[in-house]
């Protein structure tokens, strides 16, 4: 929601206006990515280690090992943080390098293609 929109806007400002870059913007952007990665990874771990969900959906849940769970958590946080970074940075590059209509059209086309593919 708001945090994602804010981080995407900060990234766009960093690319579009290099004279307005500050350290605080970079720190804010990085903490936004890290927070998103941690929230997604910790909620995934909580669902996966739940006895109820492991019994209910054994094919989907149960991949977090009892030993080495902290290493798996660090790997998940790293993955989701980097995923968020790449997603936002590529969107900002698209918007900064082309017109807004072109970027909006490509994103709409991608949305409908994914929607059609899922059905």
Image: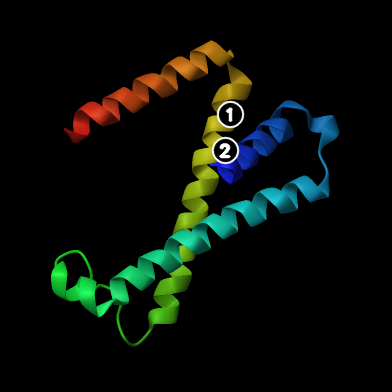
The numbered dot on residue 49 is none
Is residue 58 something one can see in this rendering? no
Q: Residue at x 21, y 26 (%)?
A: 116
Element assignment for label 1: helix
Residue 71's spot in the image, x, y percent? 43, 77
Residue behind mark 1: 93
- The quarter of the image holding the C terminus is top left
- Circles 2 and 1 in contact, beta carbons < 8 Å: yes
Q: Number of labelled discs? A: 2
Residue 27's spot in the image, x, y percent? 73, 53
Residue 101's spot in the image, x, y percent? 53, 11
Q: In the current view of this chain or complex, which residue is farthest to the bottom?
A: 67
Q: Residue at x 78, y 28 (%)?
A: 17
* Figure quadrant of residue 35: bottom right
Count neighbours of disc 1 (C-alpha within 10 A) and say few if under 14, some if 14 to 19, many if 20 or more. some
73 on left or right of 85 = left
Count neighbours of disc 2 (C-alpha within 10 A) and say few if under 14, some if 14 to 19, many if 20 or more. some
28 on left or right of 103 = right
Instruction: Name the colour scheme.
Output: rainbow
Q: In the current view of this chain or complex, which residue is farthest to the front?
A: 52
Element assignment for label 2: helix
Instruction: Answer above or below: position of 111 versus 81.
Output: above
Q: Residue at x 83, y 44 (%)?
A: 22
Q: Residue at x 38, y 84 (%)?
A: 68
Instruction: Answer above or below: position of 13 versus 47.
Output: above
Residue 77's spot in the image, x, y percent? 48, 64
* Figure quadrant of residue 54: bottom left
Residue behind mark 2: 89
Q: Nearer the viewer, residue 56 or 23?
A: 56
Is residue 70 something one can see in this rendering? yes
**Mark 2 vs mark 1, CA separation in Å:** 6 Å
């Amino acid at each position: 929601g708001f945090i994602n929109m804010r981080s995407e806007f900060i990234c766009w400002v960093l690319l579009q206006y290099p004279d307005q870059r500050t350290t605080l913007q970079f720190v804010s952007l990085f903490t936004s990515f890290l927070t998103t990665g941690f929230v997604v990874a910790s909620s995934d771990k909580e669902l996966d280690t739940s006895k109820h969900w492991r019994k209910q959906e054994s094919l989907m849940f149960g991949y977090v090992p009892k030993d080495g769970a902290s290493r798996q958590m660090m790997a998940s946080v790293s993955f989701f943080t980097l995923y968020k970074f790449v997603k936002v940075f590529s969107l900002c590059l698209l918007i900064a390098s082309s017109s807004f209509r072109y970027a909006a059209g490509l994103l709409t086309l991608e949305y409908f293609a994914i929607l059609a593919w899922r059905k």
